[in-house]
Image (cartoon, rainbow, N blue to C red):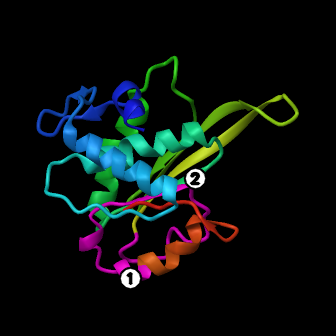
């Protein structure tokens, strides 16, 4: 995961707004090790950290595309503690990571929409299916407001989820309760992360 972050993703630098390649940092290595460990064990992970660590660049910028590239056809769910942060997260992290991907690696964009309460990006990845034929699978990153309607992610089956600023979410209990089934594949949980 961290190799993907360092080699395939770009992030928007805080104050200057310049799009740069992330550099190796010990704190990122620790974050990715915790994510990988939780993923391998089938656990949900919550990370509490100080401001300006860059967790949103990882959680809403890098990891949606890591999971899409390794699981073509999946859905990703992102949210935050208020509508302004949801919109900023999609624009500054998700869209920046996708738009700055190398042309050799970047999947085809199918559709993108950004409204006041939700945004999404659908991309297409060709895969060789079980019949050894090329099949185009569409993956979607959903970035939605959940403070008014904490059930906005429910009804989707998600491979990965990132709940930014989770401790500040005014309806965190309802969000968790309504989204739990989103991360189930039969009776197995598919590892949300917040």
Q: Residue furthest right?
A: 131
In magenta stretch: residue 85: no
Distance between the alpha carbons at the discs numbered 1 and 2: 22 Å
Question: Where is mark 1, residue-wise?
Answer: 173
Residue 74 percent coordinates (x, y): 61, 49
Q: Residue furthest left?
A: 15
**Viewer-nearest residue: 149 or 132:** 132
Residue at (38%, 82%) from the top-left corner? Answer: 173
Instruction: Considering the whole magenta stretch, tell me its main secondary structure.
Output: loop
| Left or right of 3 in this view: 57 | left
Residue at (39%, 66%) from the top-left corner? Answer: 145
Residue stretch in magenta: 146-174
**Viewer-nearest residue: 145 or 24:** 24
**Viewer-nearest residue: 15 or 50:** 50
Evaluate whether residue 180 shows in this view: yes
Quick one: quadrant of the N terminus? top left
Evaluate whether residue 142 shows in this view: no
In magenta stretch: residue 172: yes
On residue 75, the disc is: 2
């Amino acid at each position: 995961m961290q190799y993907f972050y360092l080699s395939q993703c770009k992030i928007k630098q805080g104050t200057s707004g310049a799009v740069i390649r992330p550099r190796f940092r010990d704190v990122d290595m620790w974050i990715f090790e915790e994510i990988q460990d939780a993923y391998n064990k089938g656990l949900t992970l919550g990370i509490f950290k100080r401001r300006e660590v860059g967790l949103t660049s990882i959680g809403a910028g890098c990891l949606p595309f890591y999971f899409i590239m390794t699981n073509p056809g999946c859905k990703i769910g992102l949210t935050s503690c208020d509508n302004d942060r949801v919109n900023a997260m999609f624009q500054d992290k998700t869209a920046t990571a996708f738009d700055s991907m190398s042309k050799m690696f970047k999947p085809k964009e199918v559709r993108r929409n950004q409204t006041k309460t939700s945004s999404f990006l659908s991309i297409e990845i060709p895969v060789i299916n079980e019949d050894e034929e090329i099949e185009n699978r569409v993956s979607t990153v959903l970035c939605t407001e959940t403070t008014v309607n904490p059930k906005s992610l429910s009804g989707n089956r998600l491979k990965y989820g990132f709940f930014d600023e989770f401790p500040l979410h005014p309806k965190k209990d309802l969000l968790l309760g309504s989204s739990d089934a989103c991360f189930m594949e039969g009776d197995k949980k598919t590892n949300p992360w917040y």
